[in-house]
Amino acid sequence: SKKPKVAVLGAAGGIGQPLALLLKGSNLVGELSLYDIVGTEGVAADLSHIDSSVKVSSATGADKLGEALYDCDLVVIPAGVPRKPGMTRDDLFNINAGIVANLCAGIAKYCPGAWVAIISNPVNSTVPIAAEVFKKAGTYDPRKLLGVTKLDVLRANTFVAEAIGKAPESVSVPVIGGHAGVTILPLLSQTTPRVEVSADKAKALTERIQDAGTEVVKAKAGKGSATLSMAYAAAKFAESCLLALQGQSVVECAYVESHLTDLPFFASQVRLGRSGVEEYLPLGSFNELETKNFGALKSELRGSIQKGVDFVHKS
Ligand code: APR
């Protein structure tokens, strides 16, 4: 069968470019469709010189969105604006919410069966926004709408491995909840292989994982947020989706519509297969710290979900 067509919407951005580069180097991709409102052709021309068989196409501007999305199997969305000086969180929310809603209306129209992986922040709200847009259009398939939280997992693996003196590749930490601050809940007690850290150390590690984005924002000194590590996480996540599309069974952490808790969207380990999310892995048992943090994340995450739903219904 034909190798999949993958679109990157926001392909000329800080995340979009390295993500496109990694996908151009992936033997799971057939065609890479790059879309942005500016600068797409340059990125595509540059990548097209790489001697991989992945076919690269580009489209720029709203009137080319249909062309970019035509026949896509997977659409990855890092489009948006990062926070600039003078901008409030609400300004940022309204801009990115509008961008994601527009792009998802395009997906509903031009490739309604595609898997959709959302990176644009705030993911806790943009995924519910996408769901509402797809519901309105009558194309919603909750199994194929995924918020990308894999960077939280990579960070947890890296920081825990560092703390216990193991190789990061050998450590696996489930991270559940959402994709911002206290909504990020690493389940250190379920790390494989099992780790024994003191309660104080577990608390410090948890807080570092929750605030890891800020480490990058500070180090970049006003010039942006995580782009390279985010692109790496998203490319690995996209490859898992493509393996699943081929019929392989893959387990990933993702922020999805969920009935595991009383929150309508929740990040957890899910098993992906040909039709999308095919199984929700149980959350397992929490220790004292995790139970406390789980209690604390609920109202914040619930508010972010509602904010996304309200955005679509008031506009
Ligand atoms: N359609 C397509 N692309 C768009 C649109 C749109 N309507 N609006 C903006 N873009 C593009 C921009 O032109 C830019 O190329 O999205 C890209 C965003 O890139 P950056 O500004 O460099 O931002 P980046 O750091 O990549 O982050 C993008 O991901 O992690 C989140 O919080 C982050 O929401 C932000 C998003």
Image (cartoon, rainbow, N blue to C red):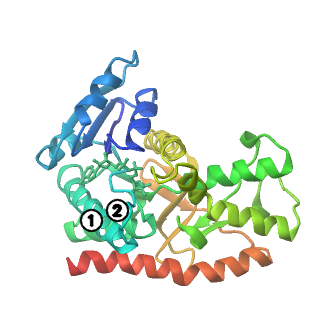
Q: Secondary structure at mark 2?
A: loop
The answer to whether any part of residue 121 appears in the image is yes
Q: Residue at x 34, y 56 (%)?
A: 81
Is 151 placed left or right of 56 in the picture?
A: right
Image coordinates of residue 24 in percent, x first then y, are 40, 28
Q: Which residue is more in the foreground, 68 or 213?
A: 213
Q: Tell me the number on the disc at residue 134.
A: 1
Which quadrant of the rendered structure holds the N terminus?
top left
Q: In the picture, residue 204 is in which quadrant? A: bottom right
Q: Quadrant of residue 16?
A: top left
N-terminal of the pair, mark 2 or mark 1, is: 1
Q: Which residue type carries mark 2? A: Asp
Q: Is residue 1 above or below residue 131?
A: above
Residue denoted by label 2: 141
Q: Nearer the viewer, residue 59 or 269?
A: 59
- Amino acid carrying label 1: it is Phe
Give the residue drawn at x 77%, y 69%.
203
- Callout 1: SS: helix
Q: Is residue 61 left or right of residue 143?
A: left
Give the vertical position of 255 relative to 51 (above or below).
below
Residue occupying the point 67% across, 59% down: 174
